[in-house]
Amino acid sequence: VYTTAAGLDGAGRGQTAATPCRSLTNLLGQYDLGPGDVVFIDNGFYTSATRISNADADGTPSNPIMFLGPTNAGASMAIFSNFVLRDAFVLSNARNVRLMGKITLRSWTNGVRIVQGPPINASTNNEIRGLTIISNNRYGVFMNGANVDANRIVSNSFIGASGPFWQDYGVAVFFGNRNVITNNRITGLQFYGVYFANAAASNRVVGNVIRSNDSIGIL
């Protein structure tokens, strides 16, 4: 299914590139995504926050649900930006979801927040890959919850001081376990590049470039 930037002519059902949904929120309101489904996100400027839960999107390990940024050669970024204290993407009780590609998240509270849904469910085996996460107020990616488990943060660019906010942290894990942070570039942050707290255990940090942050690289 397809979505286009808010404000463009996109009031369709999203079943072809010529008839895109007008936003990700609109698309998720129309469809319950299942294993193997792919959402193609057009280039352009988006201002709406997006919440993804297993009620909207529940993949399997072998057939995840994919949210892909622009795939055409030479296409510009899909830019999600809003100067408000909200999260660009929330994955709540989400499983086997991939958010990937030419997507920029800028000037939110957090770029991506991954949390366990009520009462005590799990957000597990999700992947954030290839994004540019820049100048958000607090965290680039914030994983929070004992059952936020086995997620992967791969090959993203986290950039702190460029815009209205000086981003505090690149990736933070509170309570979560077995998450992998690898091959990211994390620079120019106000505090920590990667931050673990509240007995987060068995997480791995491998092959990242973490430099020129104002405080600590990994804590």
Image (cartoon, rainbow, N blue to C red):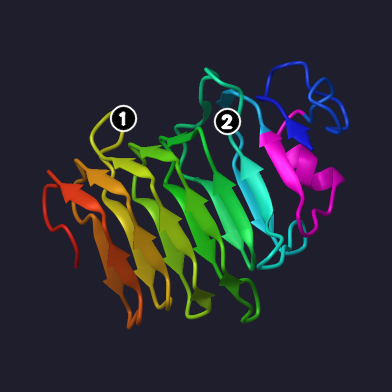
Q: Which residue is rendered at x = 40% and y = 37% of the image?
A: 132
Residue 106 shows which numbered tag? Answer: none
Residue 126: which quarter of the image?
bottom right
Could you say whether the residue bearing mark 1 is in a helix, strand or loop? loop
Relative side of 16 to 127, left or right = right
In the image: residue 192, left or right of residue 74: left
In front of the other: 135 or 124? 124
Q: CA distance from mark 2 to mark 1?
A: 16 Å
Q: Position of residue 56 (x, y in %)?
A: 76, 56
Up the image or down, 46 lies above or below 115; here it is above
What's the residue at 79%, 31% (across, down)?
A: 21
Magenta span of residues: 22-40
x, y (%) of residue 50? 63, 45
Position of 72 with respect to 13 (left or right) is left
As shown in the figure, which amino acid type bears the numbered disc 1?
Answer: Pro
Image quarter where the C terminus lies is: bottom left
Q: Are the residues tagged 2 and 1 within 8 Å (C-beta)?
A: no
- Mark 2 lies on a secondary structure that is loop
Mark 2 burial class by Cα count in 10 Å: few <14, some 14-19, many 20+? some
Q: Which residue shows up at 77% across the image and 62% down it?
A: 55
Q: Is residue 152 left or right of residue 122?
A: left
Find residue 86 and report its horizontal and vertical position in percent. 50, 46
Residue type (three-letter) at the residue carrying disc 2: Thr
Residue located at (32% from left, 43% from top): 158
Q: Mark 1 — residue?
A: 164
Crowding around mark 1 (Cα neighbors within 10 Å: few <14, some 14 to 19, many 20+) is: few
Which mark is drawn over residue 47?
Answer: 2
Looking at the rendered image, the quarter that the N terminus falls into is top right
Vertical comparison of 121 with 98: above or below:
below
Instruction: Work out whether mark 2 precedes mark 1 in sequence or the reverse, and give the earlier one.
Output: 2
Residue 129 within the magenta-colored segment of the rendering? no
